[in-house]
Every structure is written in C-alpha cells, then in structure tokens.
Amino acid sequence: MLFPITYRVNARGHLEIGGCDLADLAAAHGTPLFVYDEATIRQRAAEFVSAMGEAGRVLYSAKAFASPGFLRVVAEEGLGADVVSAGELELALRAGLKGDQIFFLGNNKSAQEIALAYQAGATLVIDGAYEFELLQRVIPEGERARALVRISPGIKPDTHDFISTGQLDSKFGFSIENGQARAAVETALRHPRLELVGLHSHIGSQIFDLRAHQAAMDVMLDLLVELKRDLGYEPANLGAGGGLGIAYTKEDDPPTPRQFVEVIRSALAAGSDRRGLKRPQLVIEPGRAVAGPAGVTVYTVGSIKDIPGVRRFVAVDGGMGDNIRPKLYGARYEAVKVAEPEAAGGELVTIAGKYCESTDILISEIRLPPLQPGDLLCVPATGAYCLAMASNYNGMPRPEVVMVAAGQARVIRRRETLDDLLAAEVL
C-alpha cells in the first residue's frame, strides 16, 4: 500500500485522492502541501481496533503526526493516544481525548509535564529512576498516579540503528539484562505516589519482521514469571509498543495491521498460558502505520540543473524542512508526476530540495517522465514523521495541511506566514 486507498487517475489524467484532484488542491492551497486521506486513516485505525478485539487497547502514537484535526479522526475510530511532551498532551486534549485514553511516555519528563499529565488523568510510563523522585515531589500526598514501568527487553530488531530502541544500549527504559528492570518494579510497587498498573516495552520502528516482537514478548513474559514468583506481582497491562513498518517504495511489502496485532496477541496468549500467567491486557501504539500511508506531499518543480554525464537535478519548493527523513535515516521515497501519475519512467533524475544544504536531497536517482518548471510532483507515504519533524530552517514557513474526503478538502493546519516566524522573537 504505497498510496492512500482512494487513489485514482481521473478523467483529466490527474492523480486524485479522496475525490480531490491534486492539481486543483495545489492551485487552491499552494505547495508544498500535505494531503491526508480520511478514508485511509479510518481504515488503518479500524483494522488495528478490530484485530485487537477485547484483548486490549490501541493507542495512536502522536509523535508521528499530532494535529488535533487528525487526532479527532483516530479517536472516532476507537484509538487512544500516547504522547511524549506537554505539547502533545495539550494537542490530544484539544482534540477531545480524555485523560484515561492517554499514556504519557518520554525518557526525561519534567516536573511540569508529570504534573500536567497527572492533572489530566493520563497514565504515566516511567522511563528512568529520576522520575520516581519527581513523582514524590509532584503528586500530592495521599494521591497516586497510574503508571507503567518501561522495560528494555534487550531485543534489537532488523531496522535502522537510529530507530531501534529495545536493546541494552538505549536511552529508553530499564534493562532486564542488568537487573534494573526488576529493581524498578520493586521501587514502583512500594512507591507512595504511584499505582503500578502494568509494564511497557517498545523495540523500535519501521519493522517488517515480526519475529522480533515475538522474541520481545517471550522476554517480557519470562520477566513476569520472575515478578509473580518473587514479588507476587502480575501486571494488569502489558505494553508492546508499536513499530509496524509501512511501504515507502514499490519493493516494500510490510505486514498488515491485522497481522501485526495477531502475531503479538498470539505470542502473549500462548506465552502466558504456557507459563501459567494471567493474561494481561495488551497495549499497542501504532503511529507510522496509521498516519504514514494516509498522507502525501505535493511539490512544485522549479530549477532544473543538468551536469552532463553526471546527474540531472530537479529542485522542488520543499525539502529537508518538511521531510528530514532522507537526511536523518537515509529514507527512500517514490514520486509521481501529478499530471501523469502512471506514465512509464523516463529520464533518471535526482529530486533536490530548496534548502541551503548540499545534502538536501529528497530522492536520489528516480526515473520520471520529462519535467518542466511548474510541474507538480506527488511523494506518497509522507504522513508520518515528516511534518511532525518539520522546521523553519532557512526561515521557511511550514506547509499547509488538508484532509480530504468525498471530494471535499478541509484545512486542518494553515500554512505558516512570515509573521508566524517572528511571533516568538523579541524585537
């Protein structure tokens, strides 16, 4: 699934999503433009919820993309949210989510963030020993915050090193290997300001091979055996994180949301029964797998530079300011011409951004039909970790975002202006 489910080529020969011609959207809203397909968001979210059934709950990982307009849609499909900052918490609350639908993660929460999460009724995910001290100071005497302890299971999945989080050498969580996990659970159980309602783990993202999740579940269940035997503790909730990968290129073939959930559910059920454990409620946190396939970016072609015998650079009006992933992770994308989305590839070009960095390259060496200044390009699978990581580098305002459905487009985030760039400056 590379494009949103409503993708089609219309009678004008243009790429259409959600019943909206991307050329018309570009004319009305300008470029760069992020376009989210509501039908795809709902389908992906609903598939996770349906596959989970009564076995647990599904949270949307807000760091993938956290516009309130987007969060409202996933909430309507039955998803809660996991957030990692006071800002994401506020966005989730503004979208209408309730505190008991929100988990607050993060490896270095401030006292203010813990206080805000507690006041909102969110569940905290304890990620380091320092948080135990903060809880003692922040939570009023006689009250207790619902919390999980984040465990590092020592599993390194087959993904980029920069998005692998479950191994021993990670800033996240308490390690099982060195005994910190057991000690953290003991501390949590006797902590006067904390109600320990479960354990949490997350091994990384953009994962296709689900055997890593099965291995992580086995490690976590072995820990549960130890905790039950020695401490008499059995968690009500067991978080398995998210991490399901998506297709960024035509060659990618990731598991479906249903396959992802069923593999983890089965590993939890069989592993608990085999060890004589009560089955805890499973908590998963997809982000990329919901937002990523639902979003595309539309750019306008500008400068074209030929270096004979070397390369043809085609520059667009965005780049690393709205999609840092190619530079950060070496991420690879596809692109199509909006006016000829299914034309056979022609010349070999490199799609460059407009930012003043030599590494501002969106796509290296892709075959596209002949391009001219003013042509529109569409890059699919940009719904996650693109606008969420966007910056104002080079003094560039961030793009507009529209949600499309049934031939209608609504703005869920307006394009920034030059005045917005100055809003926080003291002149």
Image: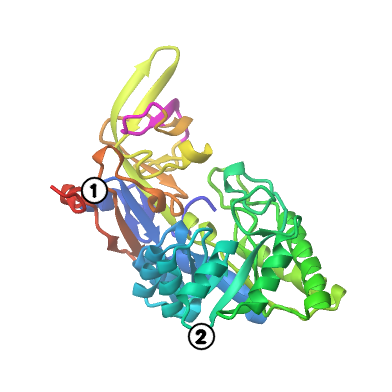
Which picture quadrant has residue 153?
A: bottom right
Marks 2 and 1: which is nearer the front?
2
The furthest residue to the bottom: 142
Residue 8 pos. (x, y %): 42, 54
Residue under the point 44% across and 12% down:
309
The furthest residue to the left: 427
- Residue 272 on the magenta segment: no
Note whether 319 is above or below 190 in the view shown: above
Label 2: element kind: loop
Of the pair 361 and 409, the residue shown nearer to us: 361
Main SS class of the magenta portion in the image? loop
Which disc number belongs to residue 347? none
Residue 225 pos. (x, y %): 82, 72
Of the pair 294 and 231, the residue shown nearer to us: 231
Q: Amino acid at mark 1?
A: Gly
C-alpha separation, residue under disc 2 versus residue under disc 1: 51 Å
Q: Are marks 2 and 1 in contact (CB under 8 Å)?
A: no
Query: Which badge, 2 or 1, is on the more N-terminal residue?
Result: 1
Of the pair 296 and 131, the residue shown nearer to us: 131
Residue 160 visible? The answer is: no
Which picture quadrant has residue 47?
A: bottom right
Which disc number belongs to residue 143? 2
The region drawn magenta spans 344-358
Q: Amino acid at mark 2?
A: Glu
Q: How many marks?
A: 2
Residue 369 pos. (x, y %): 40, 32
Q: Which residue is labeled 1 in the image?
A: 30
Of the pair 16 and 254, the residue shown nearer to us: 254
Instruction: State left or right for residue 64 relative to residue 210.
Output: left
Residue 259 visible? The answer is: yes
